[in-house]
Image (cartoon, rainbow, N blue to C red):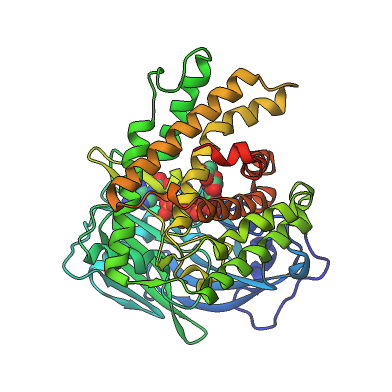
């Protein structure tokens, strides 16, 4: 994060003495989405002690507002101020195992990321089971469930937009980092699906609720941990590795063929769509609704074109495809996942679970909860098969001059085979084959690729060639037919 010459410091701000430390710490956090943005200042939006007097460590909950000088030029449409939640542990001599999570000092005390401290995560779990209230936080157990009291939480280390801790392979608690008024869709949809008896999500165990701007806010959610699970991205990557190691074999001939799993994932996603429709309803997409979705897609395209020359060059051709949302004919909208990809699917010993119903992290809450076509989720999964197929090749391409055309063909075959198996599974479970609405599907797929170009530009510039390649494919008549 480029530092500012004169960061904003409001007198009386309870975290004022930590501002510089926070400004240095935030960009190192995987969950901080505004890496590289021009920061204008930081302020404390809310701050409360949630431990009882005399307890060690002291536990604080805070919402901080980070303001940006570059909101107008931000390619992903970031706003002028973004708010993040912190749980802070404060102690004069914290245990050595939280050293990596130290943010800074306040007087004699060390202040650190509280989720790193097993004592704090254990306490939060206990408070949920007790339906306790601590300061502004309400700890709520999901009715008719019993969260296991299994001791300290272990922070999950990995690629996350939020922060999670795992309790003895029995439960997992996720602290939402973006602080937004309203019910978080991840909690809302998990709850709705759980009450629908869904076997496709991990059972919800509880939540922590708070307040922001006088309105309720979801602080965290607790769900059953799926032990012995593997995520779809890792499994798909292993399959592609097998394939590319044996360039003379086709995807259906190699040992790690993924098509059976892709078919099962298609059925799982379909089941989730049917359950969400049953729980929360469906509506016909009228002309006005379709125009709104199209306008949103075109607006995103403009931002991407302004930021990425590869998108600007194809802007008009992309816009023509996106308009398929209004010209494709009648469709139905409902609540959907909104940010589906292989990493959001967990293979358990008995089947697949879908996780993380928060929607695209850069969208406002209002946009994330807006009913949309299930085709958005289907398209997002098709994009993910492309990603899995071409990720490794794109890495090799960065270190070699010419990609091996044989390997490219194999990668494309892998993508086609798994995209097709996914659609077969989806069609089998819903009775509707997504490939029968090619215009709509292509519009959603291209919209997702445009999002991904922006996402990768900001977060993983080395990966941007993956969605750019797919964008080109989706714009060529031959490429459009391949699924
Ligand atoms: N119910 C669960 N059981 C087992 N692991 C889970 C469960 N939910 C999430 N995870 C693990 O936590 C990771 C992050 O979860 P996710 O909900 O995607 O968080 P984020 O919103 O931070 O991206 C997942 O990739 C998965 O490895
Ligand atoms: O999981 P998140 O909610 O944080 O989703 C964001 O990050 C994803 C990457 O981790 C990103 O997904 C993109 O990369 C995946 C491979 O890492 C690929 O499978 C997806 O198809 C691709 O979109 C997601 O877009 C972003 O919102």
Q: Locate residue 288, reporting x and y percent.
A: 54, 76
In the rendered view, would you say 180 is above or below 306? below
In the rendered view, would you say 275 is above or below 351? below
In the rendered view, would you say 92 is above or below 395? below
Question: Residue 16 occupies which quadrant of the picture?
Answer: bottom right
Q: Residue furthest bottom?
A: 214
Front residue of this view, candidates 241 and 93: 241
Q: Residue furthest left?
A: 144
In the rendered view, would you say 151 is above or below 276? above
> Which residue is at a point 31% across and 40% down the rendered structure image?
264
Q: Residue furthest right?
A: 5
> Which residue is at a point 34% across and 35% down the rendered structure image?
261
Please state the total of marks drawn on the protein image. Answer: 0
Is any part of residue 330 visible from this angle?
A: yes
Is any part of residue 75 visible from this angle?
A: no
Question: Residue 105 occupies which quadrant of the picture?
Answer: bottom right
> Which residue is at a point 69% across and 27% down the rendered structure image?
397
- 194 left or right of 180 in image: left
Quadrant housing the N terminus: bottom right
> Which residue is at a point 64% across and 53% down the rendered structure image?
450
Q: Locate residue 458, reporting x and y percent.
A: 68, 52
- 346 left or right of 178 in image: left
Q: Locate residue 203, reporting x and y percent.
A: 25, 58
Front residue of this view, candidates 416 and 111: 416
Q: Locate residue 366, reporting x and y percent.
A: 51, 75
Front residue of this view, candidates 455 and 1: 455
- 456 left or right of 424 in image: right
């Amino acid at each position: 994060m480029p530092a500012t010459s004169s960061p904003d410091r409001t007198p009386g701000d309870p975290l004022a003495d930590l501002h510089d430390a926070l400004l240095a710490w935030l960009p190192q956090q995987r969950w901080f989405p505004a890496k590289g943005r021009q920061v204008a200042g930081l302020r404390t939006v809310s701050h409360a002690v949630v431990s009882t007097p005399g307890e060690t460590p002291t536990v604080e909950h805070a919402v901080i507002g980070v303001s940006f000088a570059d909101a107008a030029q931000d390619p992903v449409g970031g706003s002028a101020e973004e708010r993040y939640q912190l749980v802070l542990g404060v102690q004069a001599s914290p245990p050595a195992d939280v050293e990596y999570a130290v943010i800074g000092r306040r007087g004699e005390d060390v202040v650190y990321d509280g989720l790193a401290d097993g004592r704090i995560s254990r306490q939060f779990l206990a408070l949920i089971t007790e339906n306790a209230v601590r300061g502004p936080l309400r700890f709520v157990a999901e009715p008719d469930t019993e969260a296991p009291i299994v001791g300290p939480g272990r922070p999950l280390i990995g690629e996350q937009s939020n922060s999670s801790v795992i309790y003895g392979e029995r439960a997992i608690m996720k602290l939402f980092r973006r602080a937004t008024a309203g019910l978080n869709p991840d909690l809302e949809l998990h709850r709705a699906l759980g009450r629908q008896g869904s076997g496709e999500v991990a059972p919800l165990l509880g939540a922590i609720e708070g307040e922001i701007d006088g309105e309720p806010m979801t602080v965290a959610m607790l769900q059953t941990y799926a032990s012995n699970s593997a995520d779809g991205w890792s499994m798909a990557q292993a399959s592609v590795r097998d394939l590319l190691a044996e360039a003379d074999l086709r995807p259906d001939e190699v040992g790690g063929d993924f098509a059976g799993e892709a078919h099962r994932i298609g059925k799982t996603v379909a089941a989730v769509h049917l359950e969400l429709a049953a729980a929360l309803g469906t509506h016909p997409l009228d002309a006005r609704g379709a125009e709104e979705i199209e306008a949103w897609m075109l607006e995103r395209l403009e931002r991407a074109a302004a930021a990425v020359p590869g998108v600007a060059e194809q802007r008009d051709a992309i816009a023509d495809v996106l308009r398929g949302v209004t010209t494709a004919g009648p469709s139905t909208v409902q609540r959907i996942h909104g940010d589906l990809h292989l990493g959001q699917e967990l293979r358990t010993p008995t089947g697949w679970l879908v996780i993380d119903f928060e929607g695209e992290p850069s969208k406002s809450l209002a946009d994330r909860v807006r009913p949309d076509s299930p085709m958005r989720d289907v398209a997002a999964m098709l994009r993910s098969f492309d990603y899995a197929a071409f990720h490794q090749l794109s890495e090799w391409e960065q270190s070699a001059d010419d990609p091996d055309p044989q390997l490219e063909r194999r990668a494309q075959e892998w993508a086609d085979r798994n995209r097709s198996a996914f659609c077969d599974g989806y069609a089998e479970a819903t009775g509707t084959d997504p490939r029968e609405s090619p215009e709509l599907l292509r519009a959603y797929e291209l919209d997702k690729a445009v999002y991904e170009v922006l996402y990768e530009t900001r977060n993983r510039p080395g990966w941007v060639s993956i969605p750019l390649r797919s964008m080109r494919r989706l714009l060529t008549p031959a490429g459009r037919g391949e699924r």
